[in-house]
Image: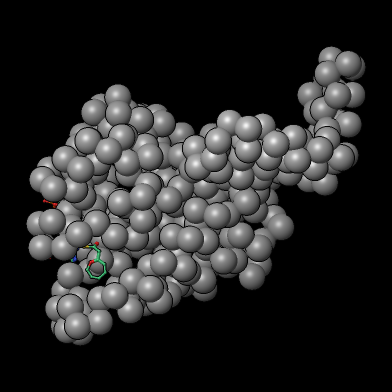
Amino acid sequence: MATNQNPYETLAWAADPDTRVGVLTLNRPEALNAFTNQMLDELADAIKRAERDPNVAALVITGAGRGFSAGQDLKEHLANDGAATIGDHLRTRYHPIIERLYGMAKPTLAAVNGVAAGAGMSLALACDFRVAGSRTRFVQAFVGVGLVPDSGSTYLLPLLVGPARALEMAMTGAPVDAPTALSWGLVNRVVEDDAVVGAATDWAGQLAAAPPKAVELIKRAMRRGSHQRLQEALEYESWLQATAAATQDHQEGLAAFLEKRPARFVGR
Ligand code: LHQ
């Protein structure tokens, strides 16, 4: 894919060759960017391409219009008698997206420009960072339609906000506003609504300029950190550090420090 071609109908894709930031926009604003099968298939493809594109060093996901995403498109779910096949629908369509996004070696940011509900919220949770607009709401909407949180929310939400707040959101389905989300650690930054994408892409540009191997290894180490004993974490850190220290970027970082100049990282 040439970096700026948009092969999708329900998404918009743009990448800046200078900053190496890719911006993926969910683009069904008339339905608050609710996920149809077509959109899920396109999203899976787009995330895979972003992961593989050497010209993309950081990924921003946002929504067109006034919402980030309202989760599963309930009209399509009903029309397709989705209740009968929901387990397979999740396994075949949602899980590959969430797993690939969460596991991506490059930094990922959700520019949460408006309401993020149901699996739309799960998508935002699977990113490394969340930048939210001041009027953004986060809604674990599943219970409102008699369902349980899916697409990673039961795993990712308690990690960010703690089990009691996660359970409260999931059981009540009550919206959480942006200031509360910030105080809970659910989002990293809150900015004016019309500044969300700009703030996220600026931040992504800074992350894209960092030494990629170190960034990838930091992500791996932090992800694993909480699932292991201290002794194991120390050993894993040592192993990762030896890998990072073998890169040209490490030598460049040291040289730049000694020469009192900005580092020029090359990604190896
Ligand atoms: C929608 C939707 C929507 C279609 C708003 N679908 N049109 C996974 C696998 C398989 C099956 C089931 O589920 C899952 C996981 C899930 O994601 S389950 C949770 C699904 N999502 C929801 O239950 C959220 C439903 N939406 C809402 O509660 C509200 O729309 C929110 C709180 C998101 C926003 O409220 P408002 O800002 O008041 O907007 P609105 O309700 O007026 O919606 C605007 C339009 O978007 C409206 O269309 P219309 O033609 O009337 O203007 C809605 O029908 C449409 N829309 N969500 N999920």
What colour scheme does the image use? one colour
Number of dots carrying numbers: 0
Q: Position of residue 24 (x, y in %)?
A: 47, 57
Instruction: Indicate the quadrant containing the N terminus: top left, top right, bottom left or bottom right.
Output: bottom right
**Residue 80 occupies quadrant:** bottom left
Q: Nearer the viewer, residue 149 or 25?
A: 149
Name the residue at 65% across, 48% down: 57
Name the residue at 63% across, 32% down: 231
Q: Is residue 159 above or below residue 262?
A: below
The answer to whether residue 238 is left or right of residue 167 is: right
Name the residue at 88% across, 31% down: 251
Q: Nearer the viewer, residue 157 or 226?
A: 226
The answer to whether residue 133 is left or right of residue 203 is: left
Give ligand 1's quarter of the image.
Answer: bottom left
- Is residue 214 visible to us here? no
The answer to whether residue 82 is left or right of residue 238 is: left
Q: Position of residue 210 (x, y in %)?
A: 69, 35
Q: Is residue 244 above or below residue 62?
A: above
Q: Position of residue 119 (x, y in %)?
A: 29, 58
The answer to whether residue 148 is left or right of residue 191 is: left
Q: Is residue 60 above or below residue 34?
A: above
Q: Nearer the viewer, residue 32 or 93?
A: 93
Q: Position of residue 207 (x, y in %)?
A: 61, 37
Name the residue at 63% across, 38% down: 232
- Is residue 99 visible to us here? yes
**Residue 32 occupies quadrant:** bottom left
Q: Nearer the viewer, residue 180 or 148?
A: 148
